[in-house]
Amino acid sequence: MSNVTILGSGSDTPDGDVSAVRVRDDAGGIKLYNFIIAEYSDDGIRQDDVDDISDLDGDFVLANSFVFQIGVQPTRDDFDDPVTGDPRPLAYETDALFLNTIDAANTPAAAAGIGVNDFVPDAAIMSTFDPTTLGGAFSE
């Protein structure tokens, strides 16, 4: 999937255990490009079985996306770090290869103007990602 905006009811809205995107066990082959995920009170992206996140050719890809204004965790898996007990960061959150901007609380400057009551970015969001690499159905 490409070019999707998912906006919740607000990062501080008491709406329970709500994630914008939830990828269940063994749901491989999911590729998400150019997503904006914002204003959820719990998780932006929650993914089970995260072993296959390695690069842009892996079974699960989130690339060239913005995840912000998330109440609890912008991304999470089902396991905590065995040493610290903290949620493990996912590869697409920490690896620059994926070209993501992930920040739980702050709206990244490049996505300013996207929020619960404002659906149009203040400026064009530019990217170095070339969608034509995904196949003939995509263009710049």
Image (cartoon, helix red, strand yellow):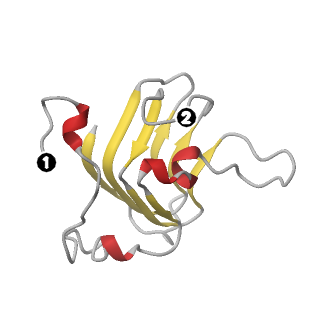
Q: Residue at x 60, y 34 (%)?
A: 50
Distance, label 1 to label 2, CA atoms, is 26 Å
**Is residue 60 toward the left or the right of residue 79 in the image?**
left
Q: Residue at x 84, y 55 (%)?
A: 84
**Is residue 11 toward the left or the right of residue 72 in the image?**
left
Is residue 115 shown to the viewer in this render? no
Along the line of sight, the residue nearer the viewer: 8 or 129: 129
Residue 74 image point, x, y percent: 53, 58
Residue 17 image point, x, y percent: 56, 52
**Is residue 50 toward the left or the right of residue 118 in the image?**
right
View extreme (right): residue: 83
Which amino acid does the dot numbered 1 rest on?
Answer: Glu
Along the line of sight, the residue nearer the viewer: 127 or 87: 127
Disc assigned to residue 53: 2
**Is residue 33 toward the left or the right of residue 47 in the image?**
left
Mark 1: give few (<14), some (14-19) or many (20+) Cα within 10 Å.
Answer: few
The picture quadrant where one finds residue 7 is bottom left
Disc 1 or disc 2, which is closer to the eye? 1
Residue 89 image point, x, y percent: 64, 51
Is residue 96 shown to the viewer in this render? yes
Q: Residue at x 43, y 55 (%)?
A: 100
Q: Secondary structure at mark 1?
A: loop
Along the line of sight, the residue nearer the viewer: 136 or 5: 136
Task: Tell me the quarter of the image containing the N terminus.
Answer: top left
**Residue 52 vertical placement versus 13 (above, below):** above
Q: Secondary structure at mark 2?
A: loop
Q: Earlier in the sequence, mark 1 or mark 2?
A: 2
Return the residue at label 1: 140
Along the line of sight, the residue nearer the viewer: 113 or 33: 33
Which amino acid does the dot numbered 2 rest on?
Answer: Ile
Q: Residue at x 35, y 40 (%)?
A: 32
The picture quadrant where one finds residue 115 is bottom left
